[in-house]
Amino acid sequence: MELRRIYDEDFNYLGYLKDRKEPLDPEEYYVVAGVMVISEKKLLVTKRAKGKTFAHQWEFTMGSVVDKESPLQGALRELKEEVGIRATDRELSFLGTMKEDQKFSKIFLLVRDVDKIKMQRSEVEDYKFVGKKELKAMLADGEFAPPMAKRIENYFEKIEDLLED
């Protein structure tokens, strides 16, 4: 069972948790957290595994914030679980929050050279590091899961100077 904290549309905690398998009421929201990892001036992107929503489409590491985790703690956990990157809260910077369809997406940035990726096969089937030009082409070609494409486009100005052409 994976429990998520439930919020209202203004990001006020409603005081209870709900299993992720349980449908949300129209006024309920939950939180997901993700990390854009830039290593050697390239963005780490992962391909969603078979059986996942938006299977075989690209994304950056992201997942539900569970139980009583903070978004930062959830982002660090997802990074470690999905791609085997251990990071500390001091290494991540906060890019921002997007209000989406019954969820708030909290996005963080890690700029650090990464020499090893260990994929969680139930979540990730492939990965690669892309520069600015390839990232733009992937977005234009619809290779990203639609919610991920929106997030990347939303924060592109904040990361573009960190990426090589």
Image: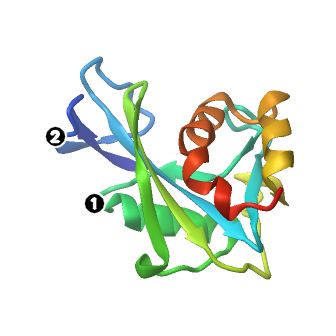
Would residue 98 be found to the left or right of residue 80 on screen?
Answer: left
As measured in the structure, the alpha-carbon distance from the residue carrying label 1 to the one carrying label 2 is 14 Å
In the image, farthest residue toward the left: 15
* Residue sitting nearer the eye, 55 or 41: 41
Would residue 5 be found to the left or right of residue 14 on screen?
Answer: right
* Residue sitting nearer the eye, 54 or 158: 158
What amino acid is labelled 2 in the image?
A: Asn
Report whether residue 157 is seen.
Answer: yes
Snapshot colouring:
rainbow
In the image, farthest residue toward the top: 26
What amino acid is labelled 1 in the image?
A: Lys
Q: Residue at x 62, y 42 (%)?
A: 152
Q: Nearer the viewer, mark 1 or mark 2?
A: 2
Q: Position of residue 127 (x, y in %)?
A: 82, 58
Height in image: 105 above or below 54? below
Would residue 106 be found to the left or right of residue 136 on screen?
Answer: left
Q: Residues within 10 Å of mark 1 (few under 14, many from 20)?
A: few
Residue 109 is drawn in which quadrant? bottom right
Residue 138 is drawn in which quadrant? top right
Q: Earlier in the sequence, mark 1 or mark 2?
A: 2
| Element marked by disc 1 | loop
Q: Position of residue 31 (x, y in %)?
A: 37, 44
Height in image: 137 above or below 39? above
Q: Position of residue 32 (x, y in %)?
A: 44, 46
| Element marked by disc 2 | loop
Q: Which residue is mark 2?
A: 12
Q: Which residue is mark 1?
A: 68
Location of the C terminus (image quadrant): bottom right
Report whether residue 56 is seen.
Answer: no
**Disc number placed over residue 116 in the picture, else none:** none
Q: Position of residue 36 (x, y in %)?
A: 61, 58
Q: Residue at x 70, y 33 (%)?
A: 145
